[in-house]
Every structure is written in structure tokens, then in C-alpha cells.
Amino acid sequence: MKYLFALAVCIGASAIVSAGPDNLKITPKGYGSFEIGQIGHGYYKSSASDFFEEIGHVWQQRAFANLGFSVHYRDKLQINIAGEGLIAFSTPQIGKFPTTLQTRQFFYIKTANALISFVDSERFTGQLQVGFFPYKYNHGVRNLGEYLFRSNPYPLVVYADFDYPQADLLGLRGHIQLFNELIENDLLVHSELLAHPIQDWSVSDIISCNLLNKSVSVGLGVSLYHIFSAYQGKYMGSALDGYYYPPNVDSTLLVSWSDTVMDRSAVNCMARLSFDPKRFLPLSVFGENDLRLYGEIDLLGVEDYEPFYQNRNERMLFSFGFNLPGFKVIDLLNLEFEYCENKSAFSDQLFYGVTKPSYEPMNLSTYNMKRVPWRWSLYIKKTFLDQHLGFITQFGRDHKKINFYYINLAEMSFAEVLPTKDDWWWVFKTEFKF
């Protein structure tokens, strides 16, 4: 009942499109989607097991509904509020856990923020955003990249979701633009929502330079990750379980590491570059997104820690993408690649304390997937009816994790499911919005 009541409040508020004085504009917004896909080949490891299980033809399915509104007041204040519902199907389905055998339904806040404009001119624009808001700094990325706010360095974990290549941040954003968007800068103070320990505060800054009418864009960013702790003291080292790493780690090092503590703070860095050559090609056959080329480098964790984090190259991700010509028939035909030397399981299992570490050498060989350093993704999108209806499909070997929407963490696979060169998955999505 509480979900229905919350949804009714959103609908009622959105329906008031003409209330208020003339300088108050209320705009309702809605979004819905249905996704269906399949893991063609991959690996599953529950936290209760020491071994990876080979899987194939595993269906993944879910549906979203999003409803909210934006309020504009005198071009100085914008308020955005939206709630979202999710119908989810869990993987795997286990008879002794009835919650896995039925659909799960969730309702949660999707966005709730206020955007205040102080100055708005061609020479200078200043804004302050506060609350819970989506944030994206590399606008070309469709899957691989945009990791400054979607990752954890120690151990390396990427938090990625299909068709949502951006972060949701809780906190403050100060934004300035200079000389008609030639230079843009975002200063962010935000609370951690993804990686343990949640509620810690980070401070980040991203600067962009847009040249040749935005045909060329360069960006740099740095994040002082978990710089302000919400807790006292430090945290136990989170790299205890050998399954994160190849079987070349001395078990005696694991024992000594278990007695240490580790500061969860880190310095993460990002550099990006994008280029749109259509300004130099006087041809009308290309669509708005065609031919755009972009790349990103992320260094997650500047400092090395012994014995596990001794190689900075293993915490660097190189991603690049290219929009193939759609010739105004296909809205977006995108191909992306990523390279990372890290051969771990990209898992945050020990953040949740669901297993005790094993120090026996035989258990250190349980992660033997021979992860290849390359990932890839092909993304295709076509919209109709002034973009109110869209169809999206994606094929790839990316940072996919198996869908999991129930409480028993012992059966959850925290590791990515596509570690080897033979692994892949596909997904198809129908979306509709107003």
C-alpha cells in the first residue's frame, strides 16, 4: 500500500500543470521501460562456494516505471522530483529461498534536487545544485567509461548498469561556465552511496574545455575519495580472500594482511577527449550522433599498498568509443572498447562480510578464470514519435553482474560474470517517455 500511495502522490503532483502564478511552471515527466536479455556464456560464484560455476543461456529481465515533475520559478530555481518503481527477477532461482521464485517490486526516490541559478549570461553562468541528482561528465559514453564516480579502487570494482552510464550523487554541485561554455567547471561534495563504507564524504572537481563550437572537448577530473570519514578510526583490509587475485599470492602475506587496517580514502583521476568531425564535413547524410570519437583514462587509486596493490597500472582503465554512421536511420550505433590489466574478479564481496577469508594455498587457486584485459560493447538505438518511443539493444562483454534482488547474500555472486574472451551477453529494451 505504501508504494501505491507514493505513486499516487507523484501522479497527483504531476497533474498540477497550470497551478500557481504565471512565473511558476510545473512540467510532469514520465518514463517506462522493459528489458529482456540473456547471458550467452559466463561464470557464477555464490559467496557460499569456493568455486566458479560455468553458466550459459541465463535469462535476465526487469521493468521500470518513473514518474516525477520539474518546477521552474523565474528562471532562477528549478526543482526536480521523481520516484521510480522496479519489477525485478532474481538469478539464480533457488527452491529453498521462496523470494527467488517470485517477482520482486521496489519503489524508491530516483531524483530529488534543487538547481539555483545565480548568474546567467554568455560570459559567466553560475549554478548551485543540492540534493540527489544524476551526474554525467563524459557525454559520449554509452557503457564503458565514466568511472570516476562508478568505481572503487581497493579492490578494483566497477558499478555499471545497462543503459545508465552515469552516477547518482547525493550532495552539492557548484557549476560555472565561462565565455559561452568555452570552459566549464564542477565542484562536487558528495556522500558515498555504493562502496563501503557508505556515508563517507568525497570532494571532486571536473573541468572541461570545449573548442571549435564543441567539436573538440577536453576534460580533467580528480576525486578525493572517502576523504571525510563518517566513522571513527580505520577499516579492516578488504583484500583478504584469494579469489580476488590470481593464484600467485603467498598465503603468509594474506595472514599478515589480515592483522592490518587500511584507510579507505583514495585519490582517483580522470582525463578524457572527444572529437566530432562533422563540423569539417559539409555533408547532410549524417545524423546528430554520427562519427563522434571519444576516449577516457581513469586512474583509480594513486597510492600503492602492499602486498596486493603494488602496480598502479592494474588500477588504470583505458576506454574509447566511436559512433558509427547511422545516416539518420539509426539514432545511435555505438562501438566501445576498454583495456585494463587487472586480473582480479572485480568483486566487493568482502565489503559485506559474508565470508571469512581462507589462507590455505589451495583456496588461492579458486579464481582461475584467466581474465582477458579487453572488454567491448555494441549499442544500437532507434526512436520514433519524436523520441517518445525507443528500442535499444546491446551486445557485449562488459562489467555485467548477475541480477540479484533478494536478501540472502550467501547465494549472491559479487563477481563479474564475463571474465574470459568467450563470455558475452545481450539485452533488448523498449522505452517510452513523455
Image (cartoon, rainbow, N blue to C red):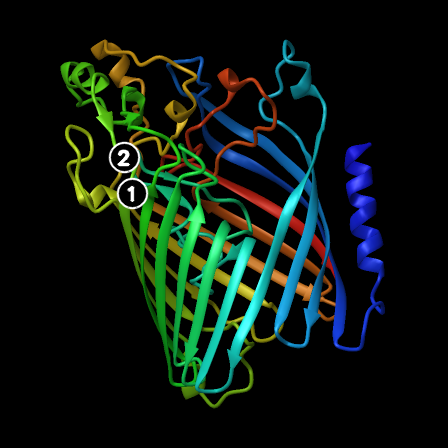
Q: Of 270 and 101, which appears nearest the observer?
A: 270
Q: Quadrant of residue 48?
A: top left
Q: Quadrant of residue 279?
A: bottom left
- Asked if disc 2 and disc 1 are in contact, CB closer than 8 Å, the reply is yes
How many marks overall? 2
Q: Of 289 and 70, which appears nearest the observer?
A: 70
Structural crowding at the residue carrying mark 1, measured as other residues with C-alpha within 10 Å and reported as few (<14), some (14–19) or many (≥20)? some
Q: Residue at x 31, y 22 (%)?
A: 243
Image coordinates of residue 355 in percent, x first then y, are 39, 14
Q: Of 325 and 212, which appears nearest the observer?
A: 212
> Is 70 placed above or below 192 here?
below
Label 1 secondary element: loop
Label at residue 373: 1
Q: Residue at x 69, y 52 (%)?
A: 82
Q: Residue at x 29, y 43 (%)?
A: 373
> Is 296 placed above or below 237 here?
below
Left or right of residue 162, residue 391 in this image: right
Query: For the residues marked 2 and 1, what is the alpha-carbon distance in whole angstroms?
Result: 7 Å
Is residue 274 visible to us here?
yes
In which quadrant is the C terminus drawn?
A: bottom right
Q: Residue at x 70, y 54 (%)?
A: 431
Q: Amino acid at mark 2?
A: Lys
Image coordinates of residue 420 in percent, x first then y, are 36, 35
Q: Amino acid at mark 1?
A: Pro
Label at residue 101: none
Is residue 140 visible to us here?
no
Image coordinates of residue 126 in percent, x first then y, are 47, 74
In which quadrant is the N terminus drawn?
A: top right
Label 2 secondary element: loop
Image coordinates of residue 216 in percent, x first then y, are 37, 77
Q: Earlier in the sequence, mark 2 or mark 1?
A: 2
Residue identifier under label 2: 343
